[in-house]
Amino acid sequence: EVRLVESGGGSVQAGGSLRLSCATSGFPFTGYAIGWFRQTPGEAREGVACISGRNGSELYHSSVKGRFTISSDNAKKTIALQMDSLKPEDTGVYYCAASRGLGLYLNDFFYEHWGQGTQVTVSS
C-alpha cells in the first residue's frame, strides 16, 4: 500500500520558519519524484517544490525560490521542506505527493499518490 504522511505544520508569524516532513512507504522511492503542493480554500492546488528520488534534482515555484528548500533522505524514504522567511501568502494546507518516473513537475496532474495534508498558517 502506498502511503505518504505529512507532519510539521503549524502556526508561525511572518518571517519565521517551519519544517515539513513527508514519510513515504509502499513504492520504489528512487523511481519517483516527490512534490510538495499547497492549497487554500477556493483556490487551485499549487505546486511548491519537487525533488527526484533518483538523483536529487530539484524544482521550485518562483514564489518560494530562495526561501524554501526541499531535500530527501533516500535511506529513510522521507522528504523534507524547509520553509524560511515565511509570508502570510504561504498559508495553506500542504500536501506531499508522488509521481512515477523521472520528470520533475509542479502540476498536480502528474502525481498519482497523495498524503492527507498538514496545515500551515502564517500570520502578519
Image (cartoon, rainbow, N blue to C red):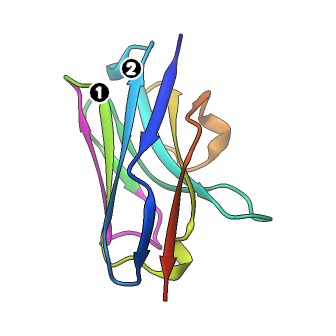
SS of the residue under disc 2: helix
Which residue is rendered at x = 50% and y = 82% of the image? 123
Residue under numbered circle 1: 54
Q: Which mark is residue 2?
A: none
Is residue 4 shown left or right of residue 29? right
Q: Earlier in the sequence, mark 1 or mark 2?
A: 2
Is 94 in front, or is 67? 94
Q: Which mark is residue 31?
A: 2
Which residue is rendered at x = 45% and y = 12% of the image? 26
Asked if the residue at tag 2 contacts the one at tag 1, i.e. Cβ–Cβ closer than 8 Å, the answer is: yes
Rounded to the nearest whole Å, what is the CA distance between mark 1 and mark 2? Answer: 6 Å
Is residue 15 shown left or right of residue 40? left
Q: Which region of the structure is painted magenta?
A: 60-74
Which residue is rendered at x = 48% and y = 29% of the image? 4
The percent coordinates of residue 59 (x first, y second) are: 39, 53
SS of the residue under disc 1: loop
Q: Is residue 78 above or below residue 35?
A: above
Res. 40 image quadrant: bottom right
Give the residue type at disc 2. Gly
The percent coordinates of residue 66 (x first, y second) are: 30, 72
The percent coordinates of residue 24 (x first, y second) are: 40, 26
Give the residue type at disc 1. Arg
The percent coordinates of residue 13 (x first, y second) are: 40, 81
Is 46 in front, or is 78? 78
Tell me the crowding category of disc 2: few under 14, some 14 to 19, or many 20 or more residues within 10 angstroms, Cα based: some
Which residue is rendered at x = 61% and y = 35% of the image? 110
